[in-house]
Image: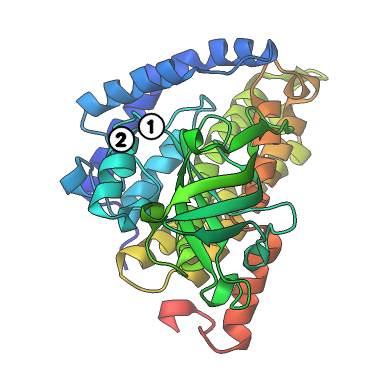
Amino acid sequence: MDFSLTDEERAVRDTVRSFIQREVMPLEAEVLRRERAHQPGLDHSEVRELQLKARKFGFWGLATPEEYGGMNLPAVLQSLIWTELGRTFVPFRFGGEADNILFHATEEQKREFLVPTIEGERRSCFAITEPGAGSDAANIRLSARRDGDDWILDGEKTFITGGHDADFAIVVAVTDREKGARNGGATAFLVDRSMGWRSEFIQTMGEGGPASLIFDGVRVPHRNILGEIGQGFTLGMEWIGKGRYTIPSHAIGIAERVLQMAIDHANTRETFGAKIGTNQAIQWMIADSETELEAARWLVLRSAWTVDQGLDPRHASSMGKLYGAGMVNRVVDRVLQIHGGMGYTRELPIERWYRQVRLYRIFEGTDEMQRLIISRDLLRGYTKIGGHLA
């Protein structure tokens, strides 16, 4: 059993790490300053400039098929890259990406929506969550009613990431209420903002924020159906499943960065004539953080490995998401405690991470939903204790 990285994995990881350290981390002080002034950390043009710099190094479309100019990287490599991105709080990610379910589009839809999104000319958002349908996505109520060659959409989506800036939305709507969303009664639509929906920004405890999308008699051509009629819920679960290993991969990078900050602080900060790192209480917080971080690393890498092996990744990914999200919350909390009052200020990024990572236990599958999936798989015999080694 070999736990080492391949030469290719190490080379890609190190190249990304170098890019983040050289091009992105120097922006951290300015991002903090802007956010303290209640401004966006980076505007769209600045993110775009960084993405184009990265493209010169070959980093474009991590998961995008090569036929669209992407890298089509294996899941393990993508996980390693997301960890490196997590080392900085600057709101940056590599360009050349599009929602994974957009690849189900027709050729005409690909020209209108997919390709411009990959090239960064258009911005999308995915809309399934509603005020009464969060974890229970099958309970969506936004309706789509057939009217000749069009569909009329009525209802509301909420907590939609990127919804306030998106040019178009991938909207999952109920097209057959008798069947129910889970059993073929929901369909995905590609809906341009120009068709009439509006967004309302939602202020959260984190930086930036999601939006509510309001659909009041929005008319959408039949040709804008994504996939097939009745496939909406399946596509929605495919979209959500994508984040089950990328989110905790990002969490690992955050935990690595803040833990190093805690170690550096413990080795320099003095109280009562001694470095605080000589105190057992501090030592135990550092030890617990490193142990949990390492455990999360292997759970997450295993979930990505499962994807690469062509196995059903849901059980492994749920464990990685559940543990990784909890881990980073505990580690950031300890690091803030080690820094004392300074950790609580907005002069350092620790309190920012503290607010940011709390979301990781909620979006794209709450802790409770991950526990439901894990326990259900075991109780119903879908998987065995020990997974693929059982």
Crowding around mark 1 (Cα neighbors within 10 Å: few <14, some 14 to 19, many 20+) is: some
Of 187 and 282, the residue lying toward us: 187
Where residue 189 sits: x, y (%)? Answer: 46, 53
**In this rendering, is residue 45 above or below 61?**
above
Where residue 221 sits: x, y (%)? Answer: 42, 50
Question: Could you tell me which residue is drawn at 65 percent across and 61 percent down?
Answer: 140
Question: Could you tell me which residue is drawn at 63 percent across and 68 percent down?
Answer: 138
Q: Which quadrant is the N terminus positioned in? A: bottom left
Amino acid type of the residue that numbered disc 1 sits on in the rendered structure:
Arg
Q: Of all residues shown, which one is farthest toward the front?
A: 148
Label 1 with label 2: CB-CB less than 8 Å: yes
Q: Earlier in the sequence, mark 1 or mark 2?
A: 2
Q: Is residue 164 visible?
A: yes
The residue labelled by disc 1 is: 122
Q: Is residue 330 left or right of residue 294?
A: right
The residue labelled by disc 2 is: 116
Residue 229, quarter of picture? bottom left
Of 83 and 373, the residue lying toward us: 373
Q: Of all residues shown, which one is farthest toward the left?
A: 67
**In this rendering, is residue 106 above or below 192?**
below
**In this rendering, is residue 90 above or below 187?**
above
Where residue 190 sits: x, y (%)? Answer: 43, 48
Question: Could you tell me which residue is drawn at 37 percent across and 41 percent down?
Answer: 81
Amino acid type of the residue that numbered disc 2 sits on in the rendered structure:
Pro
Q: Is residue 115 left or right of residue 232?
A: left
Where residue 175 sits: x, y (%)? Answer: 55, 66
Q: Is residue 22 visible?
A: no
Of 114 and 2, the residue lying toward us: 114
